[in-house]
Every structure is written in structure tokens, then in C-alpha cells.
Amino acid sequence: MTEEELLKGCLEERQECQRELYKRFAGKMMVVCMRYAKDKLEAEDMMQDGFIKVFDNVGKFKQEGSLEGWVRRIMVNTALNKIRANKMKFEDISETGSHLADGDANAIDKLSEEAILEIISRLPNGYKYVFNMFAIEGFSHKEIAEKLGIEEASSRSQYAKARKYLQNQIIQLEQIKL
Amino acid sequence: MTNNNFEKRIQDKLNQYEIEPSENLFNDILKKRASRPKSILKLTYAKLGVALLAVVAITLFVLVDTRSNSTSNDNASISVAEKDASNSNNIAEAGGLGSNAKTAKETVVAKENLKTVKQKSTTNVEKQASGKKDVSNSDVKWTNNAPSPTQKSAIANASNNIQKSTKQTKTYPGYQDNGANISERYFNIDSKDRPIIAGQQHQGKSHLYVYHSMDEALINSQDLSYLVLKPLRVIKPSATQDQIAAFEKKQLKTEHKKQQPFYLDLYYSAYQTSHSAIGNSEMANNYKTLAKTDPNHAFNVRFSTPINSHINLFTGFGLNQINTQFDGQIPNTTNKVHYETSTYYINDPITGLPKLVQQMDTILNGPVSYKFANRYTLVQIPIGLSYNIGFDKIDIGIHGSALMNITGKAHGMNPDFNLEKMQGFSSNQKQIGIGASVSLMVAYKLTNKIKIIAESGLQFYQLGGKKIGNAMNENILNKGISIGLRYTLF
């Protein structure tokens, strides 16, 4: 089934098309939601609301970008709406430890996707949201500040801290594995 | 590692990664979509209010327009029939009644036509005037009684004049009694001395005019069909002056009671809501710091009736949705240090993956941002008085009322400023509160029955949030404007 047929079917509320669209993106969108949620249950809750919005608004999709990108953006926005009520908590996280050097780039490649997701999920909420939004979704710090209700400078500084923390964690994990 | 490399590698890793959600999730999505209310039920109060007002306005205007057209058509029918009858009369007079059977027959037919059309017209208009009540001409018994000499003279004048007028223009010269324009005594009159009878323009003495006229043709053929003919059933042309005076007194008293109007107002209100927590505790002060002014709205129904010439008593209900917004920063007055112990697992016993819990020293300082909203759905019942001044087409009213607020649903967030956490609350428990409202209303007359109203005012009341899960009770001040329609029921 082509993407066009899929969209047309969803627009006509045909269940087989909705199921097909869900199957295509459910796995990846689950990862997106997991990055913002505290556990799998909350992630599934976010994904449920996200897919409802996708099916409700499928007629609004303009085929200017990829369908996956559009669905992903809806999931991210849904997740942000869910977490917006939570206070942004920016605890100080340790900045000690070594940073990843260029030569250690393979450290990331050596880690499984699951391990990386696990490391990110261990970040305090505020850092986690900022890191996900900037590093993975590609939001600017200004957009992050608006969406999370924090200062732009705060977004920048917390991102830098989160980044260093993650690099440190990756190195430690690598050392533990060795 | 350069900035781009780090982010790109993380992105690449995660974008290709997939986690299977629960098997039933898709079915849950379908179920949740199917169980949602239909789109019309998702309309906000604002949309619902505007839609209802539009429907009511259109309906009322259509009804008024239909009635107007119906009356015009009846009048046109009368004119044609009258012309027909008048021509036939002329023919009959020229040939002599009875000498020409064909002419006499035409006369009878024309008169029958006239009678039928007039009866239909009268019945229709009476129906409109008195609702669904059917008043037939057979109920009007005064025609069996002989008029007094004075009355006969008036009737003769009226009949002669009305016959002339039907041939020319509708100037209503029959409203003369011994040279005096009696219509002026009982009616508001227009520039051509014609009584303005339609609607509520008569002065409550229309039955006396009919009594003085005493001519069925005059009554039936003119706009007098607008009158409520009930008085004609009880007063007789042979009545003495004392009887007439007694009747007049009784009738005017009855009419006065009947003319007491009853108003129905349907209007939409848009508010700017200011709110604050009640009390002087640290939490209440924090609430006050965060409180923002925000827009809200309501859809209202109000019933009112005069208790004297200037004061109306009113009540009704309003469907009101109030959002109280909180947005801002609370400065921390103390720094807090949290210590956590470190626990390392070489391998997670469940996933088998290396797992690490990092030790973190947590220092909280600086301002903390909060942003949340509480939402209450209320039914408001006002009971109050209004002072009204009327001009030509404009009425001005000052309203003051006590408010009873019934909170139906409420949900929102409870912040814990010490722990810097928030917890949601939700309640369907009904909660009753009180308040007060004042407003200034201006009404502009569109038709006899409909006025457009604009109103500006203040509402103050308390929301007893603590009893329905909120951390604080809130004072609400609404500054709003309203627009809607006033319909005069009777």
C-alpha cells in the first residue's frame, strides 16, 4: 500500500489503513514517547493520545515533508502536553569525569540502542526534555524555552550539562563493560 | 567528540530503534476514538452560546416576518373583496334590488365573498393576538342589540365614511363622533388621524372605540381586527352611561393586569477573570503571585417582569466555565541539599544490561517556574432587581443581584511549593457558593417583541475549592460584557 493510499484510507476511516499506518510507525513512536515518559505505561498513554490525533488530523497532513516526520512531531507535541504540567526540575548533576574525545566516538556505536535510551531516561526530567528536544527533535533553544516555560539561557546551560553528563555516563558504561 | 558528531550518533542510534508497544494498544486507540462524544458535543460554551443565539434570533425574525406577510395578504384580500362587493352594490342600486336576478345574485355572491374573507382574516388575526385560542365571529353577540339613537348616528356616519374610504384611500374618516375625533381619545393616532392599533399602541380603551362605532362592517373591514374582541361580548349598545363607566373601569383594570410584560433574555457573556486565593498564608501568597487574568465566558438565560413602573424582578441561570490561570516564578528562600547513595549493578538482574544509578548532590536555589490552570464548570442562578428607564426605542437598566453558584465539575493542579511538585485534582462533587453581580444594560427595540441587549458588569463570588480537592479557595472577579436578545413573551 502506497503512502497516498494509506492516507486516503485513513481519511475515509478505513480500519485496515489505520492499522497499517499504526504498524508502520508504532515501534519508532514508542521510542519517541519512551524518551519523555517515566515508564512504558506512560509512554503508551502518550502514544495512544498521539495516534488519536494522527487519525483525527490525517487530512491536514500536507505532503511537503515525510509522513514519519509529521507523525513524530505529533507524538512529541503530545508528550510535551502531557509533561507540561510537571514542574521543570533542574537538579545539579555531576559535571566531574572525563568527556568523550573524538577518538572515543565509537563508544556510542558500541552501546546498544536500549542502553542509550536507558542512559537518557535516567536524566532528571528537565535535562531529559531539553536534551531530547534539542539533540534529537531539533528544536531551537528558543522553541524549547517557549514550550517548557523556561528561560532560553536556562535551556542552553541545562543542555550543556546534560550533554556532559551523558558523555560521562557513556564512558563509565564502556569501562564497566570492559 | 565534536558537537555534531555526538548528537548525530545519538540520533542515528535512536531513530532506527524500535520498541514494540503492547498488543492491545491499537484496539485501545480505536475504542477511545469511538467512545469520544460527537463533534457537536465538543463545542465550547462560546460556540454553543453563539449558535443558540443565532438560531433563536433567526427563528424569531422569521416568525415576525411571517406574521407581517400574513396580515398584509389578508388586507389585500379584503380590499379586492370589498371592491367586488362595492361594484355589485352599485349595480344593484342602478337596476333596483330584485328586478334583475342576475345582478342580485352577483351582489349576494360578492357579499358572501367579502364576509368569508373578512371572517378568515379576523379569525387569523385573533389567533395571532391570543395565541392558539380560536375566536369565531359567532362569539360576538353585540350585533343582536339595537344601538341607541346617538350610537346609530355615529354608526351611520361611520358606515357612510367607510364606504367612501374603501373606494378611495384608507383614510379612516369613520373615527369621528359629533365632529370630534374619537379615535384620539382611545388610541395613539398617526399623522393621518388613523388609530395605530397594531401591537400595543392602543391605550387600553380600544373596546370603547368599538362600542362607539357599533358597525360590524367597520370593525371587520378595518385594522380593528387587531383588537381583542372579548369586551364586545359583555357590553351592549343599549348600555347606560353608568354601565359603560363601570365596564370601562373593570376592563381597564383587567387590561392593566394583562399588559404586565414578561421578558426572556438570552445572552452570551465574555469575561476577564481576576482571581486570588483566600487567606494570608504562604501558600495563598504564592497563589496570588502566580495568578493571571484570563478570559472566560458564559451562556445565560434571564426571566424578568416589572413589579412597578421602573423596577423589574429577575432570575434565571447561566452556564459558566471558569479557568483560573497560574503562571510565574516563586523565589526559593532557602537552599536545600539532597544526598543520594550510589548503587552500582554490574548486570541488571532483569534486563541483563549494565545499569548504573549515579550519585547526585541536589541543590535547589533560584526561582522555580510554575504554570498550570484550574477549571470549574458552574451553574449560576441570579436573583435580583433592576431599575429601568425607557426612551423611544432604547431601554436602560441597572441590574443588581445575588448569585448562587453550583460548581459541577472541577479539575486542575495543586502545587506543593515546599517540595516543588504538583499533583492533579479532579472532582464532580457539587459545591454551592454565593456571590453578587451588578451590571448596566442597554436594550434597543428591533420589533415589538424583540430587543437586542448589550450589558456590561461585574461579578464577584467565591469558589470553595478546598472541598473539591483544590488546595485553596479562590475569590473570583469577572469584568464582562454581554450581548443577546430580549424577547417579550407577553
Image (spheres, grey):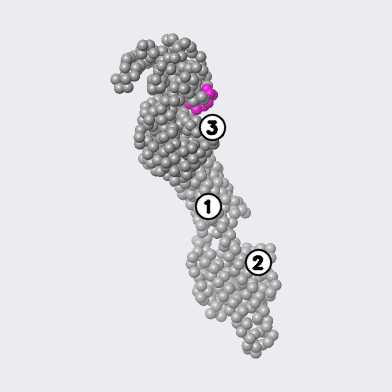
Q: Nearer the viewer, mark 2 or mark 3?
A: 3
- Check contact, mark 2 vs mark 3: CB within 8 A: no
Task: Please state the total of marks drawn on the protein image.
Answer: 3
Q: Residue at x 46, y 49 (%)?
A: B316
Q: Are marks 2 and 3 on the same chain?
A: no
Q: Closer to the observer: label 2 or label 1?
A: 1
Q: Does B371 sit above or below residue B359?
A: below
> What is the residue that sits farthest to the bottom in this orientation?
B99
Q: Is residue A64 above or below residue B154?
A: above
Q: At which x and y percent is residue B325?
A: 47, 32
> Regarding mark 1 in the picture, which secondary structure is present there?
helix
Q: Nearer the viewer, residue A138 or A90?
A: A138
Q: Residue at x 41, y 34 (%)?
A: A23
Picture disc at residue A65:
3
Dominant secondary structure, magenta:
helix
The magenta segment: A140-148
Of residues B33 and B488, which is closer to you in this image? B33
- Would you say residue A141 sits in the magenta stretch? yes
Left of B185 or right of it: where is B405? left
- Residue behind mark 1: B55
Residue B42 image offset from top left, x and y in percent: 46, 43
Q: For numbered disc 3, what is the local secondary structure?
A: loop
Characterize the local packing of mark 3: few (<14), some (14-19) or many (20 or more) Cα atoms within 10 angstroms: few
Q: Is residue B262 visible?
A: yes
**Mark 2 vs mark 1: which is more N-terminal?**
1
Q: Amino acid at mark 2?
A: Arg
Question: 10 Å neighbourhood of mark 2: few (<14), some, or many (≥20)?
Answer: many
Closer mark to the observer between disc 1 and disc 3: 3
Residue B194 got which mark?
A: 2
Q: Nearer the viewer, residue B104 or A146?
A: A146
